[in-house]
Image: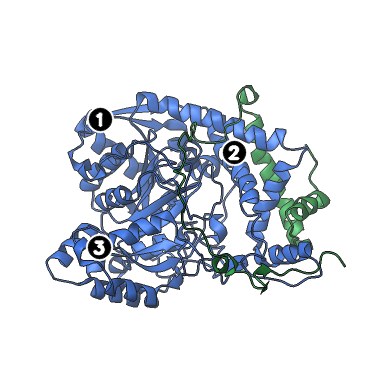
Chain colours: A blue, B green
């Protein structure tokens, strides 16, 4: 039996009862990390983890995360630990300061055992564009299906049972979608709820730090540790933090749930639709009011292009510092502009350059009004619509994705409703900053899929309570890919 | 709006200080067919130009000031740690004035 397969609460109890020590846990996690065949790690923190575990403060033993191994997406700064965001341009970069989330976890005594792969610089949703190549889905031992991205490595290590939780980031759906593809709970809290100090920015007006766990209570626990104001991040909120650990006590029976018909109808897969309806029935049987609401079809189809234009444009500014001079791979040339030009030409991969070109095109003087500013205006209409729905409803609930994890070589019709709406609607919660959570709700052909609750800003407790209720009525919590595949 | 062709894409890339291969520009130009159709979906939204652009998810007001106390900052050694060519406490670049 591996304690790493259990929930954080169970592992903590095992430590308290003397059944396992933090050193044993970390050694096992490091062993599993070295055996990982999903290409999920950028860096395994063997030396650092062993040193930390040997210096653990015994007086903090009662902290629920004390001695618990975990992993961080490699776009979170970790002082003296290499961090390259899976980009060639940052190979060899070693941060000189740490992300706030890393510091908070270290203070609790959690042990970082590795930095995980991502789509290069968090720009992508396939888990294929990092400099180390594809990251695989532990639920598919034949390695034909993606795990999604951009937080591919963190999803892989959590679902493979290497660590009980892992942090990621979510700018469009980069925590919730991989969570759906790998039978995990993936939470993106409200924009501003968690400090982003030390996160490599992609599109800061939509970037969120989120995390993967294998059950909802663990998710509530990680949120309770990470939530709260940080003066180092001026966008982190001073709104008081709720007690997330008592979500079991929340009375959800009077809550109202909205299903946006235009989004649900764009899902084609019958297995996913049926499983979703089954979960709706579980909620309505308890007495919750299920409201079928509408969103203008054209507005639904505009979510993805709006997200894409804004994120690509913001990404250009945020990656202007990648010059190969102050940090990253240096290329020699006859003048400083050419040094930068060579570093960026050789350091960014083709998919990243394509996004930058689109962002640059949208920001050209002649195009700004028609593309960038119009996208920002459309963002307001989308967010207004979602907030209007949430005025009368406690949460919006929908299938997280229209399919199970896609094949690596699969093609999608990028103008279809399934692609534009069902596959990309999750970004509305990035534009509006609402908290949003994926929980597993079914399997098809051995691969998992999820449902997603989105709530009002700063009402994480509501969506965690709803997710926990469903979790208790299904059998998908704490599933480990390797066990199911054996 | 500026019409898309290979030269425009190259201009957009070079403004961001990088270049792509001829094949990559050709692939991107094809992709722009779809991308522009997707962009056009935004223009079809009724009333889209009647609202103000949105730059943050909700209004953010930073009303506090940090205390005026001395805090640790990066040392020179730390600030230069990741630069590949350093001389006399400065990052070395090719000569600007020749």
Residue at image mark 3: A66
Residue at image mark 1: A288
Give the left or right position of residue A166, taking residue A377 as reference.
Answer: left
Question: Residue A236, located in which quarter of the rendered image?
Answer: top left
Question: Residue A13, located in which quarter of the rendered image?
Answer: bottom left
Separation (CA) of disc 1 from disc 3:
38 Å
Is A228 in front, or is A156? A228
Question: Residue A350, located in which quarter of the rendered image?
Answer: bottom right
Estimate how packed mark 3 is, as few (under 14), some (14 to 19) or many (20 or more) residues with alpha carbons within 10 Å: many
Q: What residue is drawn where x is 51% and y is 43%?
A: A206
Q: Are marks 2 and 1 on the same chain?
A: yes
Across and down, in percent, residue A238 comes to: 39, 38
Give the left or right position of residue A301, taking residue A70 as reference.
Answer: right
Residue at image mark 2: A306
Looking at the image, residue A185 lies above or below residue A161: above
Q: Is residue B21 visible?
A: no
Across and down, in percent, residue A481 comes to: 32, 65
Is B87 in front, or is A307? B87
Is B91 in front, or is A450? B91
Q: Are marks 3 and 2 on the same chain?
A: yes
Q: What residue is drawn where x is 40% and y is 60%?
A: A155
């Amino acid at each position: 039996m591996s304690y790493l397969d259990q929930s954080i609460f169970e592992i903590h109890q095992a430590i308290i009862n003397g059944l396992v020590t933090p050193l044993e846990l970390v050694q096992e996690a490091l062993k599993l990390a070295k055996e990982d065949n999903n290409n999920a790690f950028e860096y395994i923190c063997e030396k650092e983890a062993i040193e930390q575990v040997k210096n653990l403060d015994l007086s903090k033993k009662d902290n629920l995360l004390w001695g618990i191994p975990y992993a961080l997406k490699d776009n979170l700064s970790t002082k003296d630990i290499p961090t390259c965001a899976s980009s060639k341009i940052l190979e060899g970069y070693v941060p000189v300061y740490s992300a706030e989330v890393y510091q908070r976890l270290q203070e609790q005594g959690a042990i970082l055992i590795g930095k995980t792969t991502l789509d290069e610089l968090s720009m992508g949703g396939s888990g294929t564009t990092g400099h180390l190549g594809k990251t695989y889905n532990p639920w598919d031992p034949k390695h034909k299906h993606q795990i999604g991205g951009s937080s591919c490595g963190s999803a892989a290590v959590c679902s493979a049972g290497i660590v009980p939780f892992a942090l990621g980031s979510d700018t469009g759906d980069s925590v919730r979608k991989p969570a759906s593809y790998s039978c995990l709970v993936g939470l993106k809290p409200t924009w501003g709820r968690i400090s982003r100090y030390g996160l490599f920015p992609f599109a800061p007006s939509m970037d969120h730090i989120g995390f993967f766990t294998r059950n909802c209570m663990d998710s509530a626990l990680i949120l309770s540790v990470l939530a709260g104001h940080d003066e180092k991040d001026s966008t982190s909120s001073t709104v008081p933090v709720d007690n997330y650990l008592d979500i079991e006590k929340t009375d959800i029976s009077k809550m109202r749930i909205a299903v946006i018909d235009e989004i649900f109808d764009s899902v084609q897969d019958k297995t996913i639709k049926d499983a979703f309806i089954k979960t709706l029935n579980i909620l309505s049987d308890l007495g919750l009011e299920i409201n079928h609401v509408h969103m203008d079809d054209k507005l639904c189809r505009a979510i993805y292009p709006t997200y894409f234009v804004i994120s690509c444009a913001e990404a250009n500014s945020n990656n202007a510092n990648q010059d190969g001079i102050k940090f990253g791979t240096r290329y020699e040339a006859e003048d400083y502009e050419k040094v930068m030009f060579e570093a960026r030409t050789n350091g960014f991969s083709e998919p990243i350059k394509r996004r930058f070109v689109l962002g640059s095109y949208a920001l050209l003087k002649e195009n700004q009004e028609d593309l960038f500013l119009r996208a920002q205006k459309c963002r307001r209409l989308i967010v207004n619509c979602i907030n209007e729905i949430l005025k009368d409803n406690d949460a919006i609930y929908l299938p997280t994705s229209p399919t199970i994890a896609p094949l690596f070589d699969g093609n999608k019709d990028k103008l279809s409703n399934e692609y534009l709406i069902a596959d990309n609607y999750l970004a509305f919660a990035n534009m509006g900053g609402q908290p949003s959570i994926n929980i597993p709700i079914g399997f098809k052909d051995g691969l998992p899929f999820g449902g997603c609750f989105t709530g009002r800003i700063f009402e994480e407790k509501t969506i965690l309570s709803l997710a926990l209720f469903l979790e208790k009525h299904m059998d998908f919590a704490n599933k480990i890919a390797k066990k199911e595949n054996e | 709006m500026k019409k898309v062709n290979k030269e425009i894409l190259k201009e957009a890339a070079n403004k961001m200080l990088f270049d792509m291969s001829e094949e990559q520009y050709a692939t991107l130009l094809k992709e722009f067919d779809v991308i522009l159709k997707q962009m056009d979906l935004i223009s079809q939204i009724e009333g889209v130009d009647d609202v103000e652009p949105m730059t943050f998810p909700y209004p953010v007001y930073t009303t506090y000031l940090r205390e005026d106390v001395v805090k640790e900052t990066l040392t020179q050694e730390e600030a230069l740690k990741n630069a590949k060519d350093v001389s006399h406490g400065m990052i070395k670049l090719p000569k600007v004035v020749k």
